[in-house]
Image (tube, grey):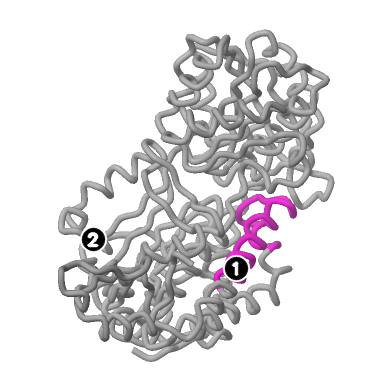
Amino acid sequence: MPNESSSPQDPSGPVLLQSFLGGQWVRGDDSPIPLHNPATGDVVARLSPGRADLAQALQFARGQGGPALRGLTFAARAQLLGRIAEVLNAERGRWLEIARINSGNTAADAAIDIDGAIGTLKYFAKLGGQIGEVQLLTDGDSGRIARDPNLEALHIGVPLDGVAVHINAFNFPAWGLWEKAAVSLLAGVPVLAKPATATAWLAHDMVASVVDQAGLPPGSLSLLAGPVGGLLDHVGLGDVVAFTGSAGTAQRLRAHAAFSRGVRLNLETDSVNAAILGPGQRVDAPAFTLLCREIVREMTSKAGQKCTAIRRVLVPRDMQAAIDDALGAELARVIAGDPANTTVTMGPLATLAQRAAVEDGIAALSGDCDVTFRGDPRALVDADPARGAFVLPTLLRASARSSSPHQVEVFGPVATTIPYSSEDELFALARAGGGSLAASVFSDDAQFLGRAAVALGSTHGRLLLVDPSIGDSHAGHGIVLPSCTHGGPGRAGGGEELGGLRGLWLYHQRVAVQTSREVIGGLKSRGYNTWQ
C-alpha cells in the first residue's frame, strides 16, 4: 500500500479522526463516533471507525516496518525517536489545546501527559545512542558449560519479528502512546497503537504529524481508530499485546485464544494505591505536611484519573481526624471548572460515562465509610454541572474494618483515610489492596522506611519512601519515570514496562546460545550487555 502521509480533514465540521493502517489513512463506512469537550458537552471531533483489513494491516507492519527497523542499529533507531520528539515538541502548543478541548485538562495536567511523552522519547533516544551501533542484546557474560573449555553459553536478545499492538487508556492519550512506542521502536518492533476512543484526537494528530515529518520507515507506526474489533484474531507468534485499562477488559483479553497460543501479553490494570504516614509522626512533623501535599496533588491532578493516583491513605489511628481536617481544608481551595478559564486548577472527568462510574464508586465506598469532605458543584467556574463531566474532590473516612476501600478503585478525585494501630496492621492493610502499582510512605524514621520496603515489596510495583531530605526533590507519587519499571502484581495486572534497558526485553526473545568461544566472541561484538 502507498504511504499516503497526509491526515484527512473534513472542512464541513469537527475534525474527522481516521485509522492509519497499511501505510495509508483509512476512512470507515460506519457512522462517525462523536468526541466531546467534557467541560461543555460540545462535540469537538468525530471518529470514523474503519472497516480495514486488519490482518493485512498487521502483515504490512510485519513485512515492511519490522525488517526496516531491525535492519537499523540501536543508535539509528534512537535517531528516529529523537526526530519524533522534535516533531512533537515543535507543536506543543497545539497538543496542549487539544488536551484541554477533548480531555478537559488544565494546562498543568496536559503538560504531564505531553511533556511526559516527549521526555520519555528523549530518554530512550539517549539510551539507544549509548547502546550504540549494535543490533543485539546480551544478558550477562558467557560461561563454560562442559569439560571442554571451548564450549560456552551466552544469552542473547533478538528482536521479535512481529508487531507490538498497544491498547491504550483514555487518561493519557499522549504519554500512553509514546511511552510504549518509544521502547518498541527502539527494540526494532513496529507499533500498531489503538488509543481509547473518547480522547483519541490527541493521539491521532500526533501520529499524523509524526508520519508526515519524522521520516519513519513505512509500516513502523500504525494507528487504529475506534473499536479493536477482530484485531486480536490476527496476532500470532512474534507479536506483543500491551494493554492499559480496566481489570474487567484485561480479564476478557486474557481469555482470548491468541494468548493460549503463546502471544505475549503485558497488562496494566486497576490499582488502589496507598499513601502511608508512618508511626510516631505528629501534626507539626515534616512528614505530615509532605503527605497532605501529595494526597491533594494526586486527588486533583487530571481530576484523579491516573492509574497511579492515591486511593487509600493509611494513618495512625490517633492522627486520622487531624489528617481529615487538613486534607479537607486544602481540598476546599481547589478551583474546579472549565480549564478554558486559567484560574481553574481541576477540570472535569473525561466523559459523562466516567462521571457516572465515579459517582457509583463513591456510593459503593459510602456503604462502610463516611464522607468527610465533598466539593460544592455550585462553585464550578464557567461550567454547567448538568452538561460537564464534573465530580468534585471527595474525601471519605474508613474504619480499620472497612473493606470497600481495598476493593473499589474510584477513578476520579476520591480518596479514603484508613486508620491503623500497629506496624503489622499497617502493612497488612496496605497489602489488602491485592497488588498495586505504587505506594508512598512518609516518615523521618529511616529504619521504618527500610522495613516498609521489604514488607510491601511483594505486592507493589513501585515504592516511594519519603523522608524530609527528599521531600521537595522527588518526582511525585504518581509520576512514572522512564528509568524505573512501571507495573504491579495482582490486580494491577502483573505487567512491567519501561525501566530503561529492562523495558527492551518485552520486545526481545532471550535465547540461550551454546557454541564455541569463537562464535560467542562474534555474538558479543554484535551485542550490548544489559548487565553493564
C-alpha separation, residue under disc 1 versus residue under disc 2? 28 Å
Residue 201: image x %, image y %?
Answer: 55, 64
Q: Residues within 10 Å of mark 2 (few under 14, many from 20)?
A: some
Q: Name the kind of residue labelled 2 in the image.
A: Val
Q: Residue at x 65, y 38 (%)?
A: 298
Residue 99: assigned label:
none
Compared with 531, 491 (above or below) is above
Task: Name the residue at 42% across, 47% down.
Answer: 268
Q: Is residue 318 left or right of residue 46?
A: right
N-terminal label among 1 and 2: 1
Tell me the kind of residue under disc 1.
Tyr
On the question of residue 226 being in view, the answer is: yes
Which one is in front in this view, the residue at disc 1 or the one at disc 2? 1
| Position in image of residue 508 (x %, y %) | 33, 69
Q: Where is mark 1, residue-wise?
A: 123
Considering only vertical position in the picture, is 196 above or below 202?
above
Q: Nearer the viewer, residue 354 or 397?
A: 397
Residue 218 percent coordinates (x, y):
41, 86
Residue 497 as seen in the image, left or right of residue 395: left
Taking the spot 60% from the left edge, 68% from the top edge, the residue there is: 123
